[in-house]
Amino acid sequence: MERLRYLTAGESHGRGLVGILEGIPANVPISKDVLNHHLARRQKGFGRGGRQLIEKDEADVLTGIRFGMTMGSPIAMVVWNRDWDNWTERMDVWQRPEEVREVTVPRPGHADLSGALKYRQKDIRNILERASARETAIRVALGTVARQFLEHLGIVIGSHVIQIHEAKSEFDATQVEDLNAMNEQADASEVRCLDSKAESHMISQIKEAMLTKNTAGGVFEIIARGLPVGLGTHVHWERKLDARIAQAMMSIQAMKGVGIGLGFEAGARWGSECHDAIYHDKERGFYRKSTGSGGTEGGMSTGEPLIVRVAMKPISTLMQPLDSVDLHTKEPVEAHIERSDACAVPAASVIGEAVLALTLADAVLEKFGGDSLEEIQAAMQWNRDNTL
Ligand code: EPS
């Protein structure tokens, strides 16, 4: 990230998850309710396991905000793990209990084996605790600060689930103007799906996964509107907006594919069916009628809706485990079973929104600079005419 930095720490069953966000300008109003609202959205979704009945995630802000306003200083926060109460001995920072049930059988698909070998850990718990998607709770908290900053600049983000296993939504979100309303509607669905026929199919796919002791993956779509032209740049690989978005999405646990706009589908289309023809009028400046590029050209935002699709693999903890090998005995055994989720694609869509907010906030700060919200609002103003 160029202008915004963030760092998270914390284990799934440790005391809590810690985050620091540095680079948010001063004078951005931040609402505690909005922070906790998005944290609650991340906890929902059909197919979640028992853990979410224990947790009620809230952001405990320690620094950087005073009277509900950012001060330009680093924002530090904690999401405490309620489940910690059940793990105090097993996850004690100092004292090893007399008996520790070590995890010695790696789950295929998880960080378990590569992590254990890389860090030379005989107890896989030392890997899986940090690899766990529990970490995304603090990322949503940090991302929601970025999101509130963006909203004050007229940039709004929404998402919905477009596929779970074989069930596919036909809903076209690219034309939706009010993304907050779209999000509310998606939140009302147990699978965050906006196509009612596909919604019941998705639920039945997850039920089938549960019944067969399996897990289900899927695809979600995130849309952002209100972006100025020219976030990111064509001049250098690491500053390209689409590249930064892809990296951010792939950093979310269990994500395996990212597409911008038509994404993989672009490979099967003629050029004339792919690219968005250019128009101009006095009111809008330059504009497009189609959304194939997904709002980026040459690594820069076009000012059109940004459309990101992300594929999540099925969660790797299977209740009917695949073959594995014990780390110590090297004997073939069934993989380790941990309490887990059958499907977390709806939650992943909320995490995607937060991660996108962090990436976009960084790109906004890179282009417009400024130490206070007012400076950035003013700098963005003249860019809004969309013409030369
Ligand atoms: C996860 C395993 C499960 C999930 C967890 C991610 O946790 P547990 O082992 O405590 O049942 O519920 O996700 C969360 C805790 C969360 O808040 O999203 C994993 O192995 O990635």
Image (cartoon, rainbow, N blue to C red):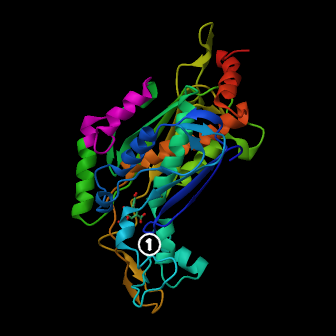
Task: Name the residue located 51 percent from the left edge and 76 percent from the top edge.
Answer: 93
Residue farthest along the front direction in this orientation: 67
60 vs 248, left or right, is left
Q: Pointer 1: residues within 10 angstroms few (<14), some, or many (20+)?
A: some
Q: Is residue 102 above or below residue 234?
A: below
Q: Is residue 294 visible?
A: no
**Quarter of the rendering containing residue 178:** top left
Name above or below for residue 193 compared with residue 314: above
Task: Report the quarter where the C terminus lies.
Answer: top right
Q: Residue at x 36, y 66 (%)?
A: 83
**Residue kind at label 1, given as amino acid type:** Pro
Q: Position of residue 55 (x, y in %)?
A: 35, 58
Q: Residue at the bottom extreme? A: 329
Pick the residue in front: 46 or 200: 46
- Find the magenta span and give its range: 176-199
Is residue 158 among what the camera can see?
yes
Q: Is residue 116 left or right of residue 373?
A: left
Q: How far across and down, in percent of the image, does residue 322 sit? A: 36, 75
Residue 234 at x, y percent in the picture? 74, 36
Q: Is 183 one of the magenta-colored residues?
A: yes
Q: Which residue is located at x 36 percent, y 51 percent?
A: 43
Specify the quadrant of the image occupied by residue 201.
top left
Quadrant field for ligand 1: bottom left
Look at 38% across and 74% down and name the residue there.
87
The residue carrying mark 1 is: 108
Which residue is nearer to you in this view: 54 or 178? 54
202 to 16, vertically: above or below? above
Q: Position of residue 75 (x, y in %)?
A: 60, 48
